[in-house]
Image (tube, rainbow, N blue to C red):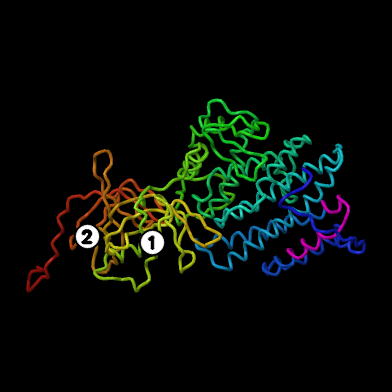
Amino acid sequence: MKNSFFLVIPAQQKNSARLKEFEAKALQHWIAELPTANPGLATRLLHDFLIDFNAVEMKIQLRLDALELLSSSVHDIEDYLRSRLIKAGFPKEDNDKKILSILVSIEKEFTLGYWMVLKELTKRDVGWFQGKNAALAIQRCIKGLSSIVVSHFIMGMPIPDWVWIDLHSLYSLSVSIKNSTTKVPNDVSQPSKASSPEECYRQILLLSLADPTGLMQKEILLVYNYIETVGPLIALKKEPVSGQQIQCIVLTDEDKAPQYQFEVSAKNESLMLYLDFTKLFKALKQKEKLINAVEARFSSMHVLRSDIGKPSAELLDYLEQRWMGVDLQGVPFFSDRTDRYIAVGLEAAHELQNALESVDERDMEFLVQSASDRLLSGIFNKTGVLSVGSLVSFRKTDSPEYKRSLGIVNKVIVDKQSGRINFGMQLLAHQSIAVTYGPLDASGKDIPQKGLFYSARELECEKNYIITDSFMLKDNDVVRMFMNNEDFPVALNNRKNVGLGYWQFECRRVAEKNKPMPAQAKKGYDFI
C-alpha cells in the first residue's frame, strides 16, 4: 500500500524550532490546559492543533508518541460530539451537520497522523522493533477510518469515497507484513484492552453487515462495541465457506462495503475475502447467554449505554437476520405509488382519528411520496421527528383523517444530495381506532389515557390489540376501555415493546363484575 486514497498527506514544513512543542513534557502540559469545561472551545483547539501538527515534518517516533498522548483527548471529544448527534431523530438540524463535519475532520486528521507514520515504516523492510510500531500504526489507522464510518452511520449518511478501499488495503498490508494478528492496546489509558488489525477490520465489516439504517442511532455504538464480544466467532477466509448458502464477500480491490451473494464469480478470487459465520450461528442457538433479558429494545426507560455489554433479545434477533444475509425490508404496502399523509406518534394519531372535520391547519401531518413499493420519502419541515422505532399512522391523500393505517418505522435512509428522508415500515394494522382507558374502578377524577385499538387475524383466529405509551401497564392487568360511546373491562396480556416508548397488549373483553350499589344516606333514627 504505497498511497492512501482518502488520507492525503499535506505538504511538510521543516521547522526544527517547533518540534519541542510536540515532545512529551510540553504536549502533556498543553493537553492538561485544554478547557474541558468548555467542550466547544476544546474541540476547536484540538482540531486546529491536529491540522497544524500534521503539516510539520518530524521523526517517526516523535509523531507516534505525540499521537498516543493525544488519543485520550481525541476520544473524549469524539464521544462528546457523537452524544450531540444522537439526541434527536431525523431530519437533522443544520447545526448537527456542522458537528458531523468537525467530528469527521478530527477523526480524519488524527488517523492521517498514524498513516504518515505507517507509510514511513513500510517504505523499507520492517524489522522487529519497527514491526511493533507498524502493528500499532495499522491498528490505529483501521480504527480511525472505522470511526469515520461509524459517525456517518449515526447520521444516516453515505460513507465518503475511498474509505472502504483504504480499509481493505490496510488489512491487506497488515497480512503482507505479518502483523494482522498482533494485538496492541486499544488506548493508552486502558492498556489491558487490546485488539489486532484483523479484529478491528472484522468489527467494522460486521457493523456494516448489520445494516445500520435499521438501527436506532444510539444502538449503532452499542452494536459496534458488542461485536468485540462475538467478533472472535467470525473468521476471514480466502475461499467460499462450505455450508453457507449465501456467501458474504469482501471485494478488497473495490471501494465497497462487504456484501452477500448467492452465486460467487470465480474471477479475481485472490482479491476476495469470505466471512465464515459457522461458529457464530452455532453460538446463537443458545441466545439466552448472549442477551440482556431485562431490557426491551425500544423501551423509553432504557437509556442504551455503549458499555452495557449485551443487546436485548429483539436486537440480537435483528442482528442474526442481517448476518444471515436476510435483507431488512419493509412491507410492500406502497405498490400503488401514490402520495400519503403521515403523522408521527400516538398523540397525533389519536387526535386525527377522533377528528370530525379537517385538521390540516394543525400541521400534524406530513405529505410524503412513495420511493418504492416498500419505502416512503419526504422532506420534513420539522427536525427530529422520525427515528427507527417511531410509531407512524398514515393515509392516502384522498382518504379522511380518521381512516389511518398504523406502522413502526424500521429503516431510515438520508439522501445527502436532496435532503429527503426515505423510510420503511413494519405494518401493525390496516385500520386502528382511537380509544381511551383507565383503572377498572375509574372515577370522574381519573384522567383517561389514550391508546390505539386494532384487530389482526393470526392463524385463522382474530385477535385484538391496544397500543399505549404507558410503561406502567403489565401482563394480567385489567383496565376499563372506552370505545365508541361504550365502556367495558379488558384483560391485558402478551406485553410487547413494539416501538420507541410504545407497548402492545393483546386485549380480551371480560365479564363486568357487579358494581356495588352506593350506600344510601341514613335518615332519622336509622342509625340505631
Q: Secondary structure at mark 1?
A: loop
> Looking at the rendering, which quadrant does residue 37 occupy?
bottom right
Residue 483: mark: 2
Q: Residues within 10 Å of mark 1 (few under 14, many from 20)?
A: many
Q: Residue at x 83, y 59 (%)?
A: 11
Q: Residue at x 32, y 63 (%)?
A: 397
Q: Main secondary structure of the magenta part?
A: helix
- Tell me which label, 2 or 1, sits earlier in the chain: 1
Q: Residues within 10 Å of mark 2 (few under 14, many from 20)?
A: some
Quadrant of the frame with the N terminus: top right
Q: In the rendered image, is residue 309 in sight? A: yes
Name above or below for residue 151 compared with residue 358.
Answer: above
**Is the residue under label 1 in contact with that under label 2 (CB below 8 Å)?**
no
> Which one is nearer the viewer's eye here, 383 or 492?
383
Name above or below for residue 41 compared with residue 260.
Answer: below
Q: Residue at x 79, y 44 (%)?
A: 2
Residue 49 shown in magenta: yes
Disc 1 marks a residue whose amino acid type is Gly
Q: Secondary structure at mark 2?
A: strand
Q: In the rendered image, is residue 497 in sight? A: no
The percent coordinates of residue 487 (x first, y second) are: 19, 59
Q: Give the residue at mark 1.
A: 345
Quadrant of the frame with the C terminus: bottom left
Disc 2 marks a residue whose amino acid type is Met
Magenta stretch: give its range. Answer: 46-64
